[in-house]
Image (tube, helix red, strand yellow):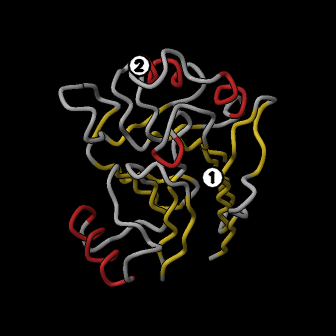
């Protein structure tokens, strides 16, 4: 199973139509997880034409009411507990105890194995204790800067194995992110 990961599209404020490279990269995914700040349901409708799409409501999504948006999601894909939330502390800057406490506030004692989040526009993959944290970054406003080709991600799940990859959008499609190697773990 392959999941498309995306966050912080900020549409139509940042850009009217999402880069076509995103749709090309997601052409073969089984589901799409959008970690919030979409600003309009139009992008959910477009992504939903590719695969079922879930959205963690972001701070910029106030007033958007739709069954595909929730503050948090606790989902099961291929036997993996996958959580999604818009705002989450940076695993590069916070202790594992802080991250666990924050996650428990939203997910309870049964934490997900994999957590998808957004908000910072900073793409990253961190495995902290028993929690794989993935921020796909932003395809439109990477690094929280100006409008340009940014990042998305994929999560490939097989029985007992997960592989997260950050993808850089380019003029010619997508490529593996130069600074963030794909991350795999088995259980």
Using the image, determine if residue 138 lies above or below residue 87. above
| Quadrant hosting residue 78 | bottom right
Under circle 1, the secondary element is: strand
The numbered mark, 2 or 1, whose residue comes first in the sequence reads 2
The structure residue drawn at horizontal position 42% and vertical position 16%, both measured from the top left corner, is: 42
* x, y percent for residue 141: 50, 37
In the picture, measured across the screen, residue 71 lies left or right of residue 164, that is left
* x, y percent for residue 109: 27, 74
The structure residue drawn at horizontal position 64% and vertical position 48%, both measured from the top left corner, is: 154
The structure residue drawn at horizontal position 36% and vertical position 36%, both measured from the top left corner, is: 37
* x, y percent for residue 156: 67, 53
- Picture disc at residue 155: 1
- The residue carrying pointer 1 sits among few (fewer than 14), some (14 to 19) or many (20 or more) residues within 10 Å by Cα, namely many
- The residue carrying pointer 2 sits among few (fewer than 14), some (14 to 19) or many (20 or more) residues within 10 Å by Cα, namely some
Q: Are marks 2 and 1 in contact (CB under 8 Å)?
A: no
In the picture, measured across the screen, residue 35 lies left or right of residue 122, that is left
In the picture, measured across the screen, residue 41 lies left or right of residue 160, that is left
Q: Nearer the viewer, residue 174 or 28?
A: 174
Using the image, determine if residue 106 lies above or below residue 138. below
| Residue at the farthest right position | 172
* x, y percent for residue 46: 52, 18
How far is mark 2 from mark 1, CA to CA?
Answer: 26 Å
Q: Nearer the viewer, mark 2 or mark 1?
A: 2
Using the image, determine if residue 93 lies above or below residue 5. below
The residue labelled by disc 2 is 12
Image quadrant where one finds the C terminus: bottom right
The structure residue drawn at horizontal position 66% and vertical position 45%, both measured from the top left corner, is: 2
Using the image, determine if residue 22 lies above or below residue 97. above
């Amino acid at each position: 199973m392959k999941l498309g990961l995306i966050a912080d599209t900020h549409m139509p404020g940042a850009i009217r139509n999402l880069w076509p490279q995103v749709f090309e990269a997601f052409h073969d995914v089984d589901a799409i997880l959008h970690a919030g700040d979409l600003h309009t349901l139009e992008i959910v409708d477009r992504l939903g034409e590719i695969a079922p799409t879930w959205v963690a409501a972001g701070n910029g999504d106030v007033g958007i009411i739709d069954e595909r948006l929730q503050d948090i999601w606790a989902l099961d894909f291929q036997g993996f507990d996958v959580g999604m939330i818009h705002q989450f502390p940076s695993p590069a800057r916070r202790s594992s105890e802080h991250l666990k406490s924050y996650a428990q506030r939203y997910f309870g004692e049964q934490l997900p194995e994999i957590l998808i989040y957004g908000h910072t526009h900073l793409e990253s993959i961190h495995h902290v204790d028993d929690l794989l944290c993935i921020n796909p970054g932003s395809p439109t406003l990477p690094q929280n800067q100006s409008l340009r080709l940014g990042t998305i991600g994929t999560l490939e799940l097989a029985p007992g194995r997960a592989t997260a990859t950050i993808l850089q959008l380019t003029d010619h499609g997508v490529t593996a992110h130069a600074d963030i190697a794909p991350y795999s773990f088995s259980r």
